[in-house]
Image (tube, helix red, strand yellow):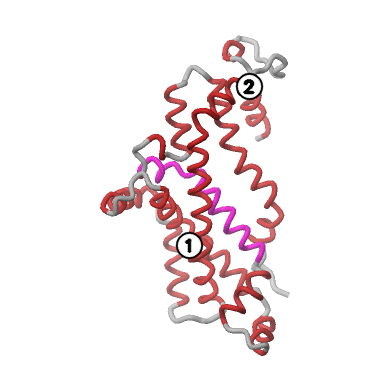
Amino acid sequence: MLFPLYWMLDASLLPSTDLVKSTPTWIPVHGTLRGYREALSTQGGHLLVSLGVSAGTVALVLLIAVPAAYGTARLRAPGARLLTFALLVAQMIPGVVMADSFYTAANRLRLLDSPLALILADSTLCVPFATLILQTAMRAVPAELGEAAVLDGAGPLRTLLGVVLPVCRNALVTASLFSFLFAWADFLFAVTLTTRDDRAPVTVGIYRFIGAHLSDWNSVMATGIIASLPAAALLVLAQRYVSAGVTGGALKD
């Protein structure tokens, strides 16, 4: 996995003339940043759109998934098992099946080329996963903690915010990270719901950039490196939380 990443980084720094030589250049001694300047000038707006859509997706997913997980895991809400089963079924629905319906709905609501349309579409596939992750973590929280909060006069909302969520921090980070990465890497909904180039996220921007600069691999590789940096940084920073969040509800004392 490291070799392809190094090859992309190497190619992004080499002049285009060096990339077509018969002998590969493994160390870009005479490297250039022209590709990065070209990538930032053309993809900067797309990167901002992707950041906004990804952050909005995380916020909406947590706004829906946290109460849903708490209600089904801790409050024994009516229909909890049916909701859990529906979430499992929703996980198996391919996104391509929903893309046409999302386009029709966004067109009727005049949300085409709007970040809100992408946030709603991405959240549709992220909410089931986030709810199941949080549900498992909340079930593993000792009941004594909730009972102690009730004795102190805390209601369901205060118990959730002050007791349950701090204990489920790893699961929250996991759900947020996967939601962000899905929205960041989404291409299907992005290309379906955006028709204007200035409103497209970075995945669509890269796709169109490659089509227009197929012979300029220096800029193409630089674009790929820039688009990978936010996701790579988040994965490195949140790695230990994700490992604990995925397995947090698997074992009980």
Q: Which region of the structure is painted magenta?
A: 169-192
State the residue in front, 85 or 169.
169
Query: Mark 1 sits on what residue?
Result: 128
Query: Which dot marks residue 187?
Result: none
Q: Amino acid at mark 2?
A: Leu
Q: Residue furthest left?
A: 108
Q: 178 above or below 223?
A: below
Give the Cα distance between marks 1 and 2.
42 Å
Q: Amino acid at mark 1?
A: Pro
Query: Mark 2 sits on what residue?
Result: 33
- Look at the numbered discs 1 and 2 and tell me whether their residues touch, using CB distance below 8 Å: no
Figure disc tally: 2
Under tag 1, what secondary structure? helix
- Crowding near the residue tagged with mark 2, few <14, some 14–19, many ≥20 C-alpha atoms within 10 Å: some
Residue 174 on the magenta span: yes
Please report the residue visible at 61 percent of the width from the left and 58 percent of the height from the top. 174
Quadrant of the rendered image containing residue 151: bottom right
Please report the residue visible at 42 percent of the width from the left and 67 percent of the height from the top. 86
Residue 5 position, x and y percent, is 64, 31
Residue 200 position, x and y percent, is 42, 39
